[in-house]
Image (spheres, grey):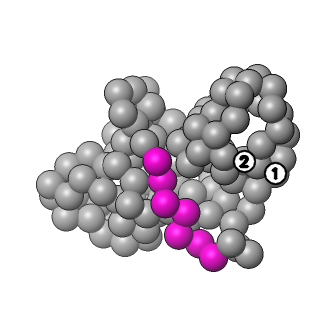
Amino acid sequence: MRLNIASPSELVKSIGFAHTAATTARTPIVINGKLMIPANTAAANVHNAFVYETEVNDATATTEVWAVNDPIYYAAAGAGALTKTAASNAFFGYALQPKAAGVLVSPLVAFNTHFTPPA
């Protein structure tokens, strides 16, 4: 799954470090229990930029209906997709736009590693 970062570049918040696993550009990765979005494809232990706050859209999504402010999760299994299903998935953020049933790409979603998953 490759996300489209929809925020203007000056509003994307990222940090640089070398992660112990290889990364694929704009494919979320769980690091210490939280998702981050690598800016570039990089081998393990190579310095990269990791996005921790932005807006994304056009990501692979499940067929369910989304409403504004629905909690959204990242299902890493298979091709990876954004979903409303919490079980076994990593918390991603909140829907900023609704999504109709059957649509397989995400509308605008707020991604932020500082968000607290719903209880």
Residue at x-position 53% and y-position 69%: 6
> Which quadrant of the view contains residue 17?
top right
Q: Which residue in the protein does label 1 denote?
A: 15
What's the residue type where badge 2 is placed? Phe
Type of secondary structure dominating the magenta stretch: loop
Numbered range of the magenta stretch: 2-8
Q: Residues within 10 Å of mark 2 (few under 14, many from 20)?
A: many
> Which quadrant of the view contains residue 65?
bottom left
How many angstroms separate mark 2 from mark 1 (CA)? 5 Å
What's the residue type where badge 1 is placed? Ile
Q: Is residue 23 magenta?
A: no
Q: Is residue 41 above or below residue 57?
A: above
Q: Which residue in the protein does label 2 denote?
A: 50
Secondary element type, mark 1: strand
Q: Position of residue 82 (x, y in %)?
A: 38, 46
Q: Position of residue 40 (x, y in %)?
A: 66, 46
- Mark 1 and mark 2 in contact (Cβ < 8 Å)? yes
